[in-house]
Image (spheres, helix red, strand yellow):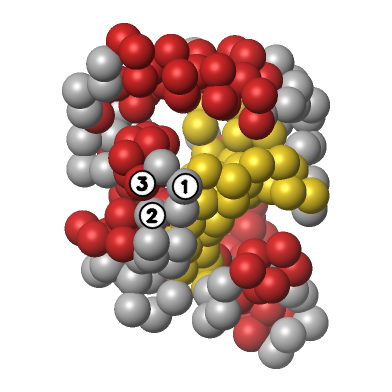
Amino acid sequence: MLICFQKFKCATKSIATTLLFITAMTSFGLINAAPTPADTPVPVEIAKALSGMRASGQSRLVVYGFNIYDAKLWVDTSFTPANYTKESFALELRYLRSFSGHSIAERSLKEMRKLGQVSNEKAAEWLVQMKQTFPDIRKSDQLIGIHRPDGSATFMMNGKAIGEVRDAEFNRLFFGIWLSPQSSEPKMRSELLGLSTGVRR
């Protein structure tokens, strides 16, 4: 028993020494720490469309153990979550799996209808619009939605514009999937807004 205990003390001391070394190296810049959201460079397409953007937060959507996409929210210093429908911001999604554009459109509409009343006629119109806008997605593809204060939005895939929507009600519900207080993914919303990390309040 004494031998086991001594080995445990040795192992613990070794781990502690290693952690102390890594901490010191990181402090002196000899080992690069993982960048915080605020340190992340603004994607070129977002910087061209909106000025003064910085990363508010990031999150990963996991469904039944499957990684779906990494999401990142870009905002300016005046951004107010409660007033997101009248704000400039960009939502960046980096997909970790492949999906058809039609399945993305159908799932988006389902989530949008949870956030507000949408007539069957309007839902059918929006579904057609999204199926025409969103292409099939492959792993590592980047999809960006750029929202403007007038309620309009531009969508881009891998740096290329794929559509523009000037329907403010559509954009309120679409971006509400991630930003509305009634989002079906409250943890993701909190992380994107920086509420769980203290980046934003």
Give the Cα distance between marks 3 and 1. 6 Å
Residue 105 placement: quadrant: top right
Q: Which residue is mark 3?
A: 168
Tell me which amino acid carries mark 1: Arg
Classed neighbour count for the residue bearing mark 2: other residues with Cα under 10 Å, few (<14), some (14–19), many (≥20): some
Image height of 104 relative to 195, above or below:
above
Tell me residue 12's x, y (percent): 57, 55
Classed neighbour count for the residue bearing mark 1: other residues with Cα under 10 Å, few (<14), some (14–19), many (≥20): some
Q: Are marks 3 and 1 in contact (CB under 8 Å)?
A: yes
Give the Cα distance between marks 2 and 3. 4 Å
Residue most toward the bottom?
Answer: 28
| Residue 65 visible in the displayed image | no
Q: Are marks 1 and 2 in contact (CB under 8 Å)?
A: yes
Tell me which amino acid carries mark 2: Gly
Classed neighbour count for the residue bearing mark 3: other residues with Cα under 10 Å, few (<14), some (14–19), many (≥20): some
68 sits left or right of 184 in the view: right
Label number found at residue 151? 2
Label number found at residue 166? 1
